[in-house]
C-alpha cells in the first residue's frame, strides 16, 4: 500500500460543499486527508454543509494533527490551513487554491494542484465523466469560487478535448 497522501485545503472543500459536489474528491482522489486547521476553518461556517463534511470525515476524509510550523517556514500572509499544509512532509501531495500558497509550495518543490486540476485529472482518468467534469466546472463558475475567465476557458477546453 502506498504511503502517498493527498491533503486538501479549506477553499477546495468549501467550494465543493457549497455546490453539493464534495463527492468529486472521493471519486478522483479516494482517501482524502486534511489537517486539523483545515477542518477547523471549514467547520467554522454554519449550515448543512458542515453535516456533509462531518459525515465524510467519518467515512473517507482523514484528519491529521499538523506538524509544528517551522519559524523559517510558511509565509505569515497565509492562513492557518495553508500554513499547516506547507509544513507537511515533502512526499505528501497538496491541493491548494490560494495563489500565494501554491507559489510557495512550487518553490519548495512540492507536488501541488488545485481544484480545477482535480476536475481535469478526474476527466483524464475516467473517474469523472467528461460531461460530469464540465457540469461541476459550470457550477463552480456560478458560485463564489474565484477563477479568471482565461483559466475557465483553458480548463473547459482541456476537459472538452478528453
Image (cartoon, rainbow, N blue to C red):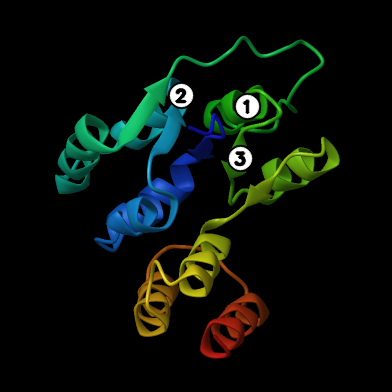
| Mark 1 neighbour class, 10 Å CA radius: few under 14, some 14 to 19, many 20 or more | many
Give the CA separation, mark 1 to mark 2.
9 Å
Q: Which mark is residue 37?
A: 2
Q: Residue at x 46, y 14 (%)?
A: 65
Position of residue 1 measured from the top left corner of the image (x, y, whole percent) = 48, 32
SS class, disc 1:
helix
Disc 3 marks which residue?
93
Image quarter of residue 141: bottom left
SS label for mark 3: strand
Q: Residues within 10 Å of mark 3 (few under 14, many from 20)?
A: some
Rounded to the nearest angstrom, the CA distance separating label 1 from label 3 is: 14 Å
Give the numbered dot on residue 68: none
Residue to which mark 1 is pinned: 83
Mark nearest the camera among 1 and 3 is: 3
Tell me if 112 is positioned left or right of 159 in this view: right
Can you say whether 55 is above or below 98 in the image?
A: above
Amino acid at each position: 500500500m502506498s504511503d502517498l497522501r493527498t491533503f486538501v485545503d479549506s477553499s477546495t472543500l468549501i467550494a465543493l460543499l457549497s455546490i453539493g459536489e464534495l463527492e468529486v474528491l472521493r471519486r478522483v482522489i479516494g482517501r482524502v486527508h486534511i489537517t486539523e486547521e483545515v477542518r477547523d476553518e471549514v467547520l467554522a461556517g454554519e449550515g448543512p454543509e458542515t453535516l456533509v463534511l462531518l459525515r465524510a470525515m467519518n467515512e473517507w476524509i482523514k484528519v491529521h494533527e499538523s506538524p509544528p510550523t517551522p519559524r523559517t517556514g510558511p509565509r505569515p500572509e497565509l492562513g492557518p490551513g495553508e500554513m499547516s499544509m506547507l509544513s507537511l512532509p515533502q512526499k505528501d501531495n497538496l491541493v491548494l487554491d490560494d495563489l500565494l500558497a501554491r507559489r510557495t509550495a512550487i518553490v519548495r518543490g512540492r507536488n501541488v494542484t488545485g481544484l480545477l486540476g482535480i476536475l481535469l485529472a478526474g476527466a483524464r482518468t475516467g473517474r469523472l465523466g467528461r460531461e460530469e467534469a464540465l457540469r461541476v466546472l459550470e457550477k463552480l463558475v456560478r458560485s463564489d469560487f474565484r477563477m479568471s475567465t482565461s483559466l475557465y476557458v483553458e480548463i473547459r477546453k482541456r476537459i472538452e478535448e478528453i
